[in-house]
Image (cartoon, rainbow, N blue to C red):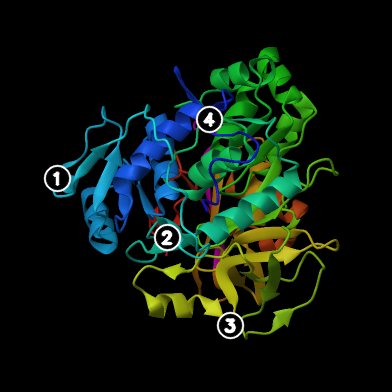
Amino acid sequence: MSAFFPPPAAGADSDRTALRFGATTLTYGELAGAAGSLAARITGSGRVAVWATPSAHTAVAVVGALLAGVPAVPLNPRTGERELAHILGDSAPSAVLADPAAELPAGLTGVPRIDVALTGTVAAPPAGPDDPESPALIVYTSGTTGPPKGVLLSHRALAASLDALADAWSWTADDVLVHALPLFHVHGLVLGVLGPLRRGGEVRHLGAFSAAGVARELGAGGGTMLFGVPTMYHRLADALDGDAGLAAALSVARLLVSGSAALPVHDHERITAATGRTVVERYGMTETLMNTSVLPGGAPRPGTVGVPLAGVGLRLVDEDGSVLGAYDGETVGEVQVRGPNLFSGYLGRPEATAAAFDGDWFRTGDMAVREADGAVRLVGRKATDLIKSGGYKIGAGEIENALLDHPGVREAAVTGEPDPDLGERIVAWIVARDAEKPPAESELAAHVAGLLAPHKRPRVVRYLDALPRNDMGKVLKKALPGAR
């Protein structure tokens, strides 16, 4: 059986809205016909690539592949020539599914193209694979530590993660999800498209993010949930100043969710002050899907990503491999997780798969502390954000939040660099709110020392016009000038 479609809450003959991308709307009945017809065409294919534009065609393509039991490989339309060639060579798709209006790059010339129609009628659409362990998606990593790896996500993993989120968020068929996320990764595609479809609710995609679009679709527009990344919420926080309509729309949304990177505490506070609502953060990654979430309805928890979801085991591990039992909000360890949400392995890379696990625990590479109630607070990536200075283990994330609390700082990133005395010194990369009058290095150091502790203050401050970021708004620290 298919793990996702048609969902029990909306049968294949339903006139209930499933997808809305701009002026394009598909009911569940129309989606069943279009996806079922596509599935009939591709059943028996080895793998198919999906040219993942922010369109209804992408959603139909992925649902069609799920129905056919054919693994789908979402392709970022902005992928460069070399990376695209690597992904195609690694995954060897038998065809690429695309919006008929999409112009494909020369790198896809040798791959047969199948145009995705938004109409179709299939009397008995394929039912999907019988084995829940069969791969549903192959999502490629960002490739920051080498060539991108294909992450095998099974039907089991997708269902387990989405059902755990539904339990944590009380997500139902009555919810209308608004977002403008790209559809080639877990956040936008799995959570943002398959999540609502599994519940029998509605996906309302903005195409391109704008505060005006969010205000239009939430509140009076009927939207109940908003998914976004920190960059989007930062822009909303900026736009809230003087925009009563946006504040009203956000204030009546049932759930505001931020993910893919940490949302600065300052933006949490600005949104709450203007709307009375808190933004819920959750934590996941391509290989694990979703691991934790702040639970709606509780006290605001800016700076944490909540507690483990149902079925997810989570522990912190020290550098020597020992498990850390401290729930003191200070002891830093690497996050390891296990559960039905985990990926099945890296495509064609058994050695990399084996190296990623400690027994049945997946090594995330993320560093965190745990609060007294078990909530997880991420402090950075092991490779780039764990700074060992003067005998202390320091997470870059908490220093970045402290810097963002300074009124003269618009953006901040923190890294470490070699120091003959301290081992590593803390370096702050700052985008000032007023480029003509940036806050002085001594002022920022004193600000951090006053909020955190003296040993966490930056020893060097470097000023930039903008921080380098990827499509999801994450800061690319290795792209910082001279960063290690």
Circle 2 sits on which residue?
483
Q: Is residue 219 magenta?
A: no
Q: Alpha-carbon distance for marks 3 and 4?
A: 42 Å
Q: Alpha-carbon distance for marks 4 and 2?
A: 49 Å
Which is nearer the eye, 183 or 474? 183
Where is residue 263? Give x, y as percent: 64, 44
| Highlighted range, magenta | 425-438
Q: What element carries label 4?
A: helix
Circle 4 sits on which residue?
28
Q: In this view, does 280 lie above or below 419?
A: above
The mark lying in front, picked from 1 and 2, is: 1
User: Which amino acid type is marked by label 3?
Assistant: Gly
The answer to whether residue 362 of the structure is visible from this angle is yes
Residue 149's image quarter? bottom left
User: Residue 179 vs residue 298: left or right?
Assistant: left
Q: What element carries label 1?
A: loop
User: Residue 344 vs residue 405: left or right?
Assistant: left
The mark lying in front, picked from 2 and 3, is: 3
Circle 1 sits on which residue?
109
The mark lying in front, picked from 4 and 1, is: 4
Residue 140's image quarter? bottom left
The mark lying in front, picked from 4 and 2, is: 4
Residue depicted at x 76% and y 36%? 278
Q: Earlier in the sequence, mark 2 or mark 3?
A: 3
Q: Which of marks 1 and 2 is nearer the N terminus?
A: 1
User: Which amino acid type is marked by label 2?
Assistant: Ala
Which is nearer the eye, 300 or 422? 300
Tell me, for residue 359, which label it has, or none: 3
Q: Earlier in the sequence, mark 4 or mark 1?
A: 4
